[in-house]
C-alpha cells in the first residue's frame, strides 16, 4: 500500500470519511440538474454507515462522488469530502488513482456486469496488489487464491483460473467482494450489493460482508433501499429523500425514535410482521417523488407530508437540526419538536375481510417439461428441464394465493401454463369447470381469455411504449368484445382509469410520461378490462419503490375485494406475502414444497426450505429477532437438478432423516398435516414438531 | 466444437450447391446459349441452326442434368450426328468416346474451356487469382491495422474531439464507394493536369508531365511497385477502413460504458491499461466478424478497382467473362467467389468462438 | 467570351486565404493525431470551481488549431459562394458563384424547410429532435439539397442534358458556350460535348427516383419476412434465414452481372421477381389492417378493400405493365434494375428486423398482448414493429445511401441503364476512360454521389444519436 505523508499523519480516532455540505449536479444541454444537495455525513473507522432511500434520491450519486466517478456530465458543485483528512474533491488524477482500489473499494449491484468477461478471475484479482503495491505476479496470484478462500468459495484453485461466466451469481458477488478486499481498503462502498441476488444467497453475502468488515476493521458505506438489510449490516443510518439527507443517526435510534415525517411514512408503508391487509393495512405515502428539476420550494417532502404547514414548510430551505439523545442524531424537519411521534396514524381505515367463495381454479398433477439443447450452437445433447413437477392446488373466489420461490423455482412457467402461453406436459387445469390444460391461448374463447389475466413485473416493460395509455386499454376492451361502439369503449376506459385512481387526462399520455407506479396501475386497469375473475400478478410491485409498493398493493386488494377476484400473487418477498395472502404455496426447483394458510406456513412446523427463506428475509423492526439460518451454496440449476429431494443439497435437517441417504434417493411424499397443511419432506412428524419459530417478536 | 464445425460445413456445402446452381441456371438461360451459338458458329445463323447447335453441343435437356454434368456427378453428354461422328463433354471431336472418362466436371478437375481466353479455364484463372491475391493481401495489411486503430482511438473517449474528427473521416470514407474514391484519387494524384502532380512538377520534385502515382496498375502484374500499386490498394482499403473503424468504434464505446470498465477504473487501473488490458479484447470481438464478413464487399471492390486501374486479376476476368458471355469462365469465377465468401464466414464463426470465452467454454 | 475562373473577382482575395486555411488544417490534424497516439491529450479534470487547470496540453492546442483552421476554411468557401451569388454575371461570380446562383430554388426550399422545422420541432417527434443534433442537421441539409435539386432539376440545369454542342468536347470547366441560351458550360463538357453541370443535376433526379423507392420496397419485403421469422422462430426461421444468407453470400457484382442483362429481360425472370417482390407491400398492408380491425368488420373491410383496389391496380401496372388505365408503368430496363436492387437489399433488412423482433418479443407488453388473446400478426405489426422503428429508420437512411452506391455500381459497369443516361454511375463510367487527361467529367458526378451518400450517413448518425437519447 502506498504510504504517503498524508496517510501517516492521519489520526485513527478521526473520521475515515467526512462529507460536508456536498452538492452534486448533472449538467445536460438544457439545464443543471441538482442530484445531491447539502449532504453531510461522517464515517468513523470500523463503522458501517447505511444510506437509505428510494430510487432517484441520490444515494448512489453520493457513493460515486466519493470515488470521483461522476461521468462527463456530473460535477461536484460545492462542499468537501475528506478521506483520512485529505479532500477527495480536489485531488488530481494520479492521487485519486492511488486511492481507488487500495484505500477505497467499491462493490456494485450487478456482479456479472462488474467482472470482465474476457479475463480470468485470478488475473482480475491479482491486478489490484500488482498495481498498488507493486507485488510480483506469482505472489499476487497467491494472495488472490487466499482471499478467494477467505470469501468462502469452494475450490479456490479452480475458481481463480475460471472466467466469470462459469460462476453463479452468488459466487460472482463473492469474487467482487474479494476483489475489493485485495488491497485491504480502509473504506468499502457497497452499492446495493445484493439486489440482483436471491434472498437465500443474499443472506450468505450479508453475513460475509459483516464478518469481513469486523475481521479487517474496514469502514463501510452501505447503500440500499431495503431498511431491513441496513438494520442487519449497519451501525448508523442516513435516510435520503430527493437529493437530501433527511434524517441520520444510530440505526436503533432512528428505527425506534424516528424524528422525520418521511422516515415515519417509510416505515408505515412497509409490511412488517403484524401488518394485516384488513385490520392494519399499510399506509402509502401520497403523491409522487418530485423530479429533480421540479422540486418544491422549502421542504422537499412538504407536498407529501402529513404534518405540512403552509407558509412555514414551503418558505425556506430546511437545515439539519440536532435531535438530543443519541450522539449525532439529526433531522431535516422544522416541526420535529412539535409532532407527537407516538400518535397512531390517523387515517388507517379498517377494511372488511372479503368472503371466500367457490373453487374457480383447480390444478391437478400439472407437469411442464421443456426440452432444451445444451451446447452453444444447437449441437449437443437434448435435456429435459422439469420446470413444474406434480403441481396440485385449488384457488377459490375472492382468495389470494401467494406463490413464493426464488429464481428457477418454476413460478413463472406455472403462470405461462395457466395463461395458455404454454401447454402443460400432463395434468389438468380446471377453470370454472372447463379443462384448459392443453388449450393454447389462441384456441381459448374470448370469455375464458378475459377472465384470466395477468399483471406483469416490470413497470417499464408492461406497456407498449409507442401507444397511448387510453389506446392500450381500449384495445383490451376491443379484443374482449366489450361494448358496441367506440364511444362506449372510450367511456369504459375512463372508468377503468378512475378505478385505478389515475386522472382521466392520462388517457392521452404516452407511457414514458408516467412513473413506475402509474404504469403499474395502467397494467392493472388493462388486466381488469374484461372483468377478470382470476388474475395472476407476477411480482407486481417488486420493481417499485417501497412507498409506491404499498399504494399499488392496496389498489390491487381493493379491486379484488370489489370484484371477488381470485388473485394468484407470485413473489419472492415473504413480508408482502404474509401481509396480503390468504394461502401460501412455496416452490423450489419446480416442486411445491409447502402449502397451507398463511398462518400455517409462517409458523412451525416448516419445510426446511421455508424455514431458511423466512430466516433470510431481513426485517426492519428492532423488536423482531430472527434465527440465522444461512444456506450453503447456490440454488442448483433447473437444467441439472439434484437427485432425490430437490432441496437436499442445501438442507440442514438432512441428517435427521431416517434412514440416512433417503433424501438423496427419493423425492419425498407430500405429508398432509392438520388443517390441510402440506409439506413435501422426508422428516418425520416428530422431528417436524420440534421446530422452533424463526421469527420472534418481543413483547411491546 | 467439432459437431459445430461439421454442421457449419454441411450448411456451407448446401449453400455452395444452391449458389452455384443459381449461377449455372442464370448463365445457361436460353438467350445466353443462343448468343453463344451465334458467337461460336456464325452471326447469321438461322434460328433452327442455333437450336441445332445447342442440341449438338450438349446444352439441351434438363437444367439439373446439365448442372450435374458440370459438377461431375452425372456422366458427360455425348452426341452422335448423322455421319456417325461423336462429340461429347469429355473428349475432343475425333477421339474415341470409349477411351474418355465418363464423368468430367468440376469434381474431376475439369473447369471447362474459356471461349474468351481460348484456353482451359483452370490455368488462366489461376494466374489471375494470384494477382488478385497480392492485391487483397496489400489491402488487408493497410486496412485492418488502420481501421482498428482509428476505431479504438475514437471509441475510447466517446464524444471527444479525437472521436469527432475520426468519426467524420470514417463516415466520409464509407460514403465513398470505390468507383468514386478511385476517380478522385486518380484526379488528385495521377493526372498530369490536375491535383498535386503538376504542383510537384513545378517544384521540380517529379519530372514534368509525369504523375506522382500511376493511374494504371497493369505494370503491377509483372512487378509491384509503390507507384503503381498504391492507388488501387488505397481505393479498396478506404471504403473498408471507414466501415470497420465505425464498427470498432461502436463496439469500443459500448465496452467503455460497461460496468467492468468502471470496476477497473475504480480499482485504480490507469486509463491506458484500462483500454489495453480490459477493453480491447472485448471490443475486438464484433469487428473481427465484421472484417471477415467484409469479404463479399471486398470482392466487389476488387472488381471495380481492377476494371478502373486495368489490373488483370480475378475481378477483371469476371467482368470480361460476363460481358463476353464466356459461360465456363463465369461459372468458375462464381465458384471461386462463393468459396471465398463461405470460407471467410466459417473463419469468422470459429474466430468468434475463440475470441469470446463465454462461448468457448460454455 | 473568356474562360470563367473558379472564384470570379472575389477569389483574388479569398483563394489564398483558403489555401492557407486548408494547409493549416492539414498540419493541425496531423499534429493532433500524433499527440493522441503519444498520449499527450489526457483531459484535465475541472477544478472544484469548474475552471480548467492552468496550462493546455499540446494535444488540446492542436485540437484548437484544427477547429479554428476548419472554420476559417469553411468561412472562406461560404464567402466565395455568397460573393458569387450577389455578383451580376457569371464572369464576376466565377464558376462556384454561378453554380450557387443556379441552385437558388434548392436554397430557397431548403431555407423554408429549416425555418419551419426548427420552429415547430418540439411537435414533430423524432424528426423534430433531429434539429437538436448538429451532425443530423448537416446530413439532413445535404440530403434535402439533393432532393430539392432533383425536384427543380429543370430550373437548375443550364442546358439540355443530352444536347451536344460542337467544339465543346472535353472542354474544361468555365468554358464559354457561345451558341446557347446560358452561354457557359459551368463544369465543362464531356467526351460527347454535353454540359457536365446539367448532366450532374439531372443525374440527381435519376438516382433519387429509384433509390428511396427501391429501399422502401426492400423494407416491405424484409419486414414482412423478418417479423414472422423472428417471432415464430423454428423451421420457418431456418428456411428464410438460409435463403437470406444465400443472397447475402453472393458478391453483389456477380449477381448484377447475372440479373441485369438485356438477355435476361427476354426470359421474363425480372417480371417473375417483380411479381414476387411487389406483392409484399400489399400483403403487409392487408395484414396490418386486418389484425388491427378484425374486431370491427365494416372498418376492416373498408381498409382492406382500399388496399386491395389500389395495390392490385399498381401491381398490375408495375410488375406486368398491364395497367388498364395506363398510369402505373415502368420501363423494362428500369424494372430490371429496380427489382435487382430490391432483391439485393431485402435480406439485409430481413436480418435486422429479425434481430429486433427476437429482442423485443421478450418484453412484457408482448406477453400482455398474448395473454389477452391477440393474434400473432397484431403483436408483430402493432406491438413489436412500432417499437423497432428507431433502428429501422436509421437503417433506412443508411440503406438509401447503400442503394445509391449500388445504382452507381450498376451504372459504372453499364448495366441496365440506357447509354446516354445522365445518372451518376454511368457518367463516372463515361468519364473514367479519359480520366488521365480530363478528370472533370468523372469527378463531378463522383463528388455529387459522395456528398449525397455522406449526407444520408450523417443523417442516420444524427437520428441514431437522437433516438438513443430517449
Image (cartoon, rainbow, N blue to C red):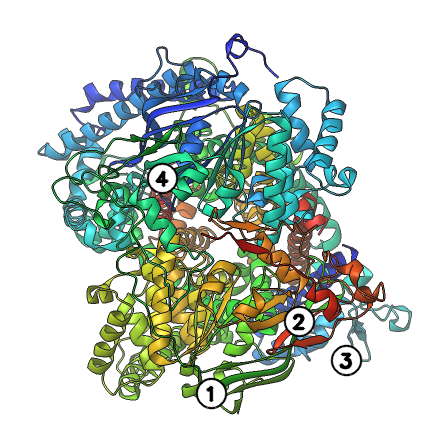
Instruction: Please check whether the numbered discs 3 and 1 fall on a single chain.
Output: no
The residue identified by callout 3 is B81
Q: Nearer the viewer, residue A3 or A639?
A: A3
The first of marks 2 and 1 along the sequence is 1
Residue at (27% x, 25% y) in the render: C71
Is residue C166 at least partly visible in the picture?
Answer: no
SS at mark 2 in the image: strand
Instruction: Please check whether the numbered discs 2 and 1 fall on a single chain.
Output: yes
The residue identified by callout 1 is A358
**Above or below, comparing residue A136 to residue B238 in the picture:** above
Residue at (81% x, 73% y) in the render: B75
Tell which subunit mark 1 falls on: A
Horizontal relation, residue A469 to residue A620: left or right: left
**Above or below, comparing residue C369 to residue A486 in the picture:** above
The residue identified by callout 2 is A679
SS at mark 1 in the image: loop
Are there few (<14), some (14-19), or many (20+) residues within 10 Å of tag 2?
many
Q: Which mark is residue A240?
A: 4
Residue C334 % position (x, y):
38, 65
Q: Nearer the viewer, residue B347 or A608?
A: A608
Disc 2 or disc 3, which is closer to the eye? 2
CA gap, disc 4 and disc 3? 100 Å
Instruction: Please check whether the numbered discs 4 and 3 fall on a single chain.
Output: no
SS at mark 3 in the image: loop
CA gap, disc 4 and disc 1? 47 Å
Instruction: Please check whether the numbered discs 4 and 1 fall on a single chain.
Output: yes
Q: Disc 4 vs disc 3: Cβ atoms closer than 8 Å?
A: no
Q: Residue furthest left?
A: C88
Amino acid at each position: 500500500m502506498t504510504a504517503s505523508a498524508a496517510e501517516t499523519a492521519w489520526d485513527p480516532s478521526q473520521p475515515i470519511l467526512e462529507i460536508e455540505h456536498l452538492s452534486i449536479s448533472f449538467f445536460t444541454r438544457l439545464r443543471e440538474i441538482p442530484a445531491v444537495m447539502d449532504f453531510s455525513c461522517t464515517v468513523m473507522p470500523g463503522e458501517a454507515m447505511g444510506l437509505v432511500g428510494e430510487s432517484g434520491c441520490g444515494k448512489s450519486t453520493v457513493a460515486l462522488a466519493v470515488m470521483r466517478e461522476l461521468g462527463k456530465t456530473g460535477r461536484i458543485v460545492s462542499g468537501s469530502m475528506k478521506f483520512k483528512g485529505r479532500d477527495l474533491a480536489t485531488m488530481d488524477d494520479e492521487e485519486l488513482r492511488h486511492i481507488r482500489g487500495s484505500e477505497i473499494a467499491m462493490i456494485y449491484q450487478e456482479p456479472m456486469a462488474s467482472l470482465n468477461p474476457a479475463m480470468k478471475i485470478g488475473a482480475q484479482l491479482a491486478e489490484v496488489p500488482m498495481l498498488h503495491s507493486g507485488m510480483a505476479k506469482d505472489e499476487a496470484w497467491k494472495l488472490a487464491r487466499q482471499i478467494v478462500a477467505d470469501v468462502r468459495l469452494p475450490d479456490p484453485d479452480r475458481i481463480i483460473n475460471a472466467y466469470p461466466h462459469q460462476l453463479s451469481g452468488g459466487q460472482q458477488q463473492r469474487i467482487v467482494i474479494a476483489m475489493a478486499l485485495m488491497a485491504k481498503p480502509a473504506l468499502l462502498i457497497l452499492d446495493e450489493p445484493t439486489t440482483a441476488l436471491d434472498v437465500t444467497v443474499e443472506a450468505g453475502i450479508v453475513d460475509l460482508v459483516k464478518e469481513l468488515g469486523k475481521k479487517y476493521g474496514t469502514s463501510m458505506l452501505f447503500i440500499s433501499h431495503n431498511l431491513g438489510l441496513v438494520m442487519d449490516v449497519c451501525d448508523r443510518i442516513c435516510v435520503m429523500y430527493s437529493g437530501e439527507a433527511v434524517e441520520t443517526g444510530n440505526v436503533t435510534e432512528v428505527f425506534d425514535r424516528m424524528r422525520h415525517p418521511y422516515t415515519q411514512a417509510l416505515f408505515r408503508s412497509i409490511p412488517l410482521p403484524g401488518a394485516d391487509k384488513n385490520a392494519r393495512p399499510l399506509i402509502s405515502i401520497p403523491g409522487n417523488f418530485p423530479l429533480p428539476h421540479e422540486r418544491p420550494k422549502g421542504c422537499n417532502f412538504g407536498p407529501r407530508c402529513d404534518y405540512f404547514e403552509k407558509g412555514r414548510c414551503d418558505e425556506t430551505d430546511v437545515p439539519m437540526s440536532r435531535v438530543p439523545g443519541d450522539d449525532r442524531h439529526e433531522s431535516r424537519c422544522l416541526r420535529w419538536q412539535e409532532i407527537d411521534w407516538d400518535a397512531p396514524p390517523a387515517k388507517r381505515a379498517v377494511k372488511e375481510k372479503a368472503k371466500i367463495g367457490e373453487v374457480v381454479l383447480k390444478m391437478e398433477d400439472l407437469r411442464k417439461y421443456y426440452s432444451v439443447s445444451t451446447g452453444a450452437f444447437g449441437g449437443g445433447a437434448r435435456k429435459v428441464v422439469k420446470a413444474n413437477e406434480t403441481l396440485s392446488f385449488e384457488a377459490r373466489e375472492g382468495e389470494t394465493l401467494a406463490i413464493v420461490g426464488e429464481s428457477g423455482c418454476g413460478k413463472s412457467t406455472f403462470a405461462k401454463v395457466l395463461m395458455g402461453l404454454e401447454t402443460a406436459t400432463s395434468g389438468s387445469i380446471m377453470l370454472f369447470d372447463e379443462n384448459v390444460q392443453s388449450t393454447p391461448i389462441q384456441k381459448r374463447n374470448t370469455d375464458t381469455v378475459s377472465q384470466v389475466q395477468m399483471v406483469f413485473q416490470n413497470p417499464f416493460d408492461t406497456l407498449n411504449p409507442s401507444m397511448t395509455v387510453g389506446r392500450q386499454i381500449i384495445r383490451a376492451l376491443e379484443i374482449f368484445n366489450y361494448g358496441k361502439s367506440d364511444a362506449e369503449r372510450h367511456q369504459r376506459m375512463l372508468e377503468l382509469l378512475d378505478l385505478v385512481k389515475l386522472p382521466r387526462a392520462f388517457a392521452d399520455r404516452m407511457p414514458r410520461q408516467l412513473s413506475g407506479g402509474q404504469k403499474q396501475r395502467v397494467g392493472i386497469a388493462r388486466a381488469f378490462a374484461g372483468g377478470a375473475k382470476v388474475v395472476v400478478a407476477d411480482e407486481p410491485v417488486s420493481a417499485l419503490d417501497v412507498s409506491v409498493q404499498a399504494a399499488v398493493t392496496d389498489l390491487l386488494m381493493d379491486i379484488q375485494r370489489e370484484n371477488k377476484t381470485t388473485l394468484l400473487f407470485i413473489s419472492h418477498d415473504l413480508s408482502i406475502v404474509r401481509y396480503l395472502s390468504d394461502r401460501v404455496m412455496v416452490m423450489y426447483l419446480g416442486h411445491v414444497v409447502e402449502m397451507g394458510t398463511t398462518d400455517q406456513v409462517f409458523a412451525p412446523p416448516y419445510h426446511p426450505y421455508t424455514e431458511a427463506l423466512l430466516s433470510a428475509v431481513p426485517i426492519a423492526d428492532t423488536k423482531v429477532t430472527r434465527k440465522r439460518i444461512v444456506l450453503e451454496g447456490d440454488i442448483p440449476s433447473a437444467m441439472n437438478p439434484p437427485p432425490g429431494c430437490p432441496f437436499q443439497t442445501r438442507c440442514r435437517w438432512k441428517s435427521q432423516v431416517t434412514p440416512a441417504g433417503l433424501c438423496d434417493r427419493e423425492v419425498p411424499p407430500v405429508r398432509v398435516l392438520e388443517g390441510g397443511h402440506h409439506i413435501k419432506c422426508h422428516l418425520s412428524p416428530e422431528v417436524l414438531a420440534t421446530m422452533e419459530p424463526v421469527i420472534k417478536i418481543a413483547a411491546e | 466444437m467439432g459437431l459445430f464445425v461439421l454442421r457449419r460445413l454441411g450448411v456451407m456445402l448446401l449453400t455452395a450447391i444452391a449458389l452455384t446452381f443459381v449461377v449455372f441456371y442464370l448463365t445457361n438461360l436460353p438467350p445466353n446459349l443462343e448468343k453463344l451459338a451465334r458467337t461460336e458458329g456464325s452471326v447469321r445463323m438461322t434460328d433452327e441452326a442455333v437450336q441445332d447447335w445447342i442440341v449438338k453441343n450438349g446444352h439441351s435437356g434438363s437444367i439439373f442434368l446439365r448442372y450435374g454434368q458440370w459438377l461431375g456427378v452425372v456422366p458427360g453428354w455425348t452426341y452422335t450426328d448423322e455421319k456417325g461422328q461423336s462429340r461429347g463433354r469429355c473428349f475432343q471431336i475425333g477421339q474415341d468416346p470409349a477411351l474418355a472418362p465418363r464423368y468430367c466436371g468440376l469434381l474431376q478437375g475439369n473447369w471447362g474451356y474459356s471461349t474468351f481466353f481460348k484456353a482451359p479455364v483452370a490455368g488462366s484463372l489461376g494466374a489471375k487469382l494470384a494477382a488478385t491475391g497480392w492485391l487483397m493481401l496489400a489491402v488487408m495489411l493497410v486496412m485492418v491495422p488502420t481501421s482498428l486503430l482509428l476505431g479504438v482511438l475514437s471509441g475510447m473517449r466517446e464524444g471527444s474531439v479525437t472521436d469527432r474528427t475520426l468519426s467524420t473521416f470514417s463516415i466520409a470514407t464509407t460514403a465513398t464507394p470505390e468507383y468514386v474514391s478511385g476517380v478522385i484519387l486518380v484526379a488528385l494524384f495521377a493526372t498530369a493536369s490536375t491535383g498535386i502532380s503538376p504542383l510537384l512538377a513545378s517544384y521540380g520534385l517529379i519530372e514534368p508531365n509525369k504523375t506522382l502515382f500511376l493511374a494504371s496498375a497493369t505494370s503491377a502484374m509483372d512487378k509491384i511497385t509503390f507507384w503503381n500499386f498504391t492507388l488501387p490498394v488505397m481505393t479498396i482499403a478506404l471504403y473498408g477502413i471507414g466501415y470497420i473503424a465505425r464498427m470498432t468504434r461502436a463496439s469500443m464505446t459500448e465496452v467503455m460504458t460497461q460496468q467492468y470498465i468502471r470496476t477497473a477504473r475504480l480499482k485504480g487501473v490507469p486509463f491506458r491499461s484500462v483500454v489495453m488490458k480490459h477493453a480491447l479484447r472485448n471490443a475486438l470481438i464484433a469487428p473481427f466478424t465484421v472484417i471477415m464478413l467484409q469479404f463479399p464487399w471486398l470482392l466487389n471492390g476488387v472488381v471495380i478497382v481492377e476494371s478502373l486501374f486495368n489490373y488483370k486479376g480475378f475481378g477483371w476476368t469476371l467482368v470480361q467473362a460476363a460481358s463476353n458471355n464466356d459461360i465456363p469462365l463465369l461459372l468458375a469465377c462464381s465458384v471461386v467467389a462463393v468459396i471465398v465468401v463461405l470460407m471467410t464466414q466459417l473463419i469468422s464463426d470459429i474466430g468468434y468462438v475463440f475470441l469470446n470465452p463465454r462461448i468457448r467454454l460454455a | 467570351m473568356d474562360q470563367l475562373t473558379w472564384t470570379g473577382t472575389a477569389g483574388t482575395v479569398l483563394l489564398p486565404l483558403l489555401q492557407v486555411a486548408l494547409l493549416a488544417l492539414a498540419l493541425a490534424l496531423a499534429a493532433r493525431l500524433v499527440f493522441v497516439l503519444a498520449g499527450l491529450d489526457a483531459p484535465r479534470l475541472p477544478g472544484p470551481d469548474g475552471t480548467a487547470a492552468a496550462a493546455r496540453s499540446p494535444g488540446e492546442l492542436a485540437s484548437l488549431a484544427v477547429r479554428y483552421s476548419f472554420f476559417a476554411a469553411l468561412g472562406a468557401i461560404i464567402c466565395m459562394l455568397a460573393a458569387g451569388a450577389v455578383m451580376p454575371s457569371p464572369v464576376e461570380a466565377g464558376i462556384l458563384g454561378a453554380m450557387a446562383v443556379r441552385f437558388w430554388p434548392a436554397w430557397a426550399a431548403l431555407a423554408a424547410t429549416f425555418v419551419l422545422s426548427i420552429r415547430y420541432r418540439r411537435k414533430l417527434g423524432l424528426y423534430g429532435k433531429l434539429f437538436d443534433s448538429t451532425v443530423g442537421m448537416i446530413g439532413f441539409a445535404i440530403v434535402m439539397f439533393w432532393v430539392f435539386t432533383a425536384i427543380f432539376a429543370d430550373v437548375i440545369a443550364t442546358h439540355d442534358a443530352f444536347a451536344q454542342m460542337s467544339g465543346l468536347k472535353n472542354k474544361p470547366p468555365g468554358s464559354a458556350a457561345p451558341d446557347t441560351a446560358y452561354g457557359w458550360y459551368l463544369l465543362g463538357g464531356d467526351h460527347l460535348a454535353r454540359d457536365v453541370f446539367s448532366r450532374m443535376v439531372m443525374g440527381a433526379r435519376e438516382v433519387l427516383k429509384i433509390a428511396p423507392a427501391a429501399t422502401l420496397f426492400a423494407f416491405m419485403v424484409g419486414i414482412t419476412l423478418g417479423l414472422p421469422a423472428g417471432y415464430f422462430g423454428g423451421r420457418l426461421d431456418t428456411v428464410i434465414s438460409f435463403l437470406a444468407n444465400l443472397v447475402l453470400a453472393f458478391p453483389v457484382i456477380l449477381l448484377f452481372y447475372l440479373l441485369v442483362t438485356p438477355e435476361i429481360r427476354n426470359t421474363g425472370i425480372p417480371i417473375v421477381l417483380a411479381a414476387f417482390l411487389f406483392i409484399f407491400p400489399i400483403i403487409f398492408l392487408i395484414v396490418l389492417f386486418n389484425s388491427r380491425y378484425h374486431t370491427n368488420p365494416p372498418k376492416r373491410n373498408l381498409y382492406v378493400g382500399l388496399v386491395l383496389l389500389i395495390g392490385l391496380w399498381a401491381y398490375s401496372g408495375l410488375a406486368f405493365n398491364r395497367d388498364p388505365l395506363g398510369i402505373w408503368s415502368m420501363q423494362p430496363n428500369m424494372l430490371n434494375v429496380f427489382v435487382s436492387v430490391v432483391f439485393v437489399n431485402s435480406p439485409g433488412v430481413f436480418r435486422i428486423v429479425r434481430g429486433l423482433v427476437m429482442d423485443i418479443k421478450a418484453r412484457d407488453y408482448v406477453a400482455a398482448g398474448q395473454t389477452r388473446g391477440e393474434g400473432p400478426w397484431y403483436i408483430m405489426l402493432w406491438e413489436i414493429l412500432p417499437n423497432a422503428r428507431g433502428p429501422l429508420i436509421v437503417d433506412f437512411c443508411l440503406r438509401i445511401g447503400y442503394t445509391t452506391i449500388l445504382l452507381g455500381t450498376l451504372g459504372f459497369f453499364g448495366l441496365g441503364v440506357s447509354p446516354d443516361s445522365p445518372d451518376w454511375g454511368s457518367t463516372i463510367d463515361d468519364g473514367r476512360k479519359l480520366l488521365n487527361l480530363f478528370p472533370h467529367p468523372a469527378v463531378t458526378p463522383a463528388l455529387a454521389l459522395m456528398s449525397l451518400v455522406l449526407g444520408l450517413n450523417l443523417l442516420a448518425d444524427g437520428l441514431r444519436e437522437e433516438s438513443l437519447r430517449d
